[in-house]
Image (cartoon, grey):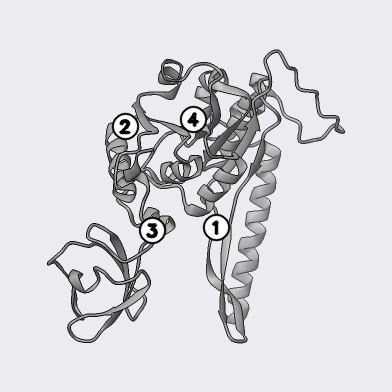
Amino acid sequence: MSSSQIVQNSGPFRVGDRVQLTGPKGRMNTITLQAGLTFHTHRGILAHDDIIGQPDGSVVTNNVGVEHLALRPLLVDFVMSMPRGAAIIYPKDAAQILAQADIFPGATVVEAGVGSGALSLWLLRAIGPAGRLASFERREEFADVARDNIATFLGDDPSNWTITLGDLADTLPETMPAGSVDRVVLDMLAPWECLGAVSDALKPGGVLLCYVATVTQLSRVAEAIRGTGFYTNPDSNETMIRGWHVEGLAVRPDHRMIGHTGFLITARRLAPDTILPELKRRPSKTDFSDADVEAWTPGALGERNVSAKVMRKRVRIAGTSAQLSKARDLDAG
């Protein structure tokens, strides 16, 4: 990693620093400091020169006496406000990806797709200067946005990061030697299509993590991972965050929370020619066949045929409900 990638996150504000300004009503604006420029709001003008040289965490006053808190934005602040080509992975999921995929300093990590570069920033921070991040993206415009976002936050193009355009299944074997990758993170619509290339690239014991949005994708990729015979049994989960209002004795959960954004599914690469012992479990009514798995693919989802018996039952239930509803209205009259 070049010296320009070591971001100055402390000390007085300098020309070129990004500064997050918080006004009296909590409204946030992020500016890049330039000598001689001004920041305008409907409540006055704040000169950049009045911020330059001030310590991080200072309160600065504009020309009409309105105060703003000035802070360097954290990475979580930056990724939530940066320009987006594709939807970003939210910080709550990015944190779990770093933990569950065990992203460590010096790791060689493959990421696909790159989206807007939000996860790339978290991965670059985790692997450190000694690590390597190889990102893959189908769409050139998304790759361009990601490059610009990462350069904006780091101040330079990271020397240990590359973006390769094209399908991962085709480009990964050409880019990464077999058995050279520690971790693979897939954020794509059909990760099961790339399992062959990913399995070749991963080291024994390496971690595969897939981020998917829907239960159909979750089911399909889980069974595809099992079907390769190259991995441990996959683990799946999602993360939800609920904030709390805490002011004196007024302590209560927030009315709004960050609920479902995506599922994380992880598995570890087995050594060559290793056969995973079968899990000993009692037979279950929820056991499935290949036809069941196929029925849960996006392409197979469509009109489901309902038996005549079930349909007659549903008609009776609907009719009864309608009669009760009409009777209620008559009684009210």
Mark found first going from the N terminus, 3 or 4: 3
Label 1 SS: loop
Under mark 1, the amino acid is Gly
Q: How far apart are marks 4 and 1 (CA)?
A: 23 Å
Q: Against 179, is 207 above or below?
A: below
Q: How far apart are marks 3 and 4 (CA)?
A: 38 Å
Q: Residue under label 2, please give it.
A: 139
Q: How crowded is mark 2: few (under 14 residues within 10 Å), some or many (20 or more)?
A: some
Q: Distance between the residues labelled 2 and 4?
A: 15 Å
Mark found first going from the N terminus, 2 or 4: 2
Under mark 2, the amino acid is Arg
Q: How far apart are marks 1 and 2 (CA)?
A: 29 Å
Q: Determine whether, in the image, residue 173 is placed left or right of residue 68.
A: right
Q: Residue under label 1, please give it.
A: 259
Q: Residue under label 3, please give it.
A: 9
Under mark 4, the amino acid is Ala
Q: How far apart are marks 2 and 3 (CA)?
A: 32 Å
Q: How crowded is mark 3: few (under 14 residues within 10 Å), some or many (20 or more)?
A: few
Residue 190's mark? 4
The reply to whether the C-beta atoms of the residues labelled 2 and 3 are less than 8 Å apart is no
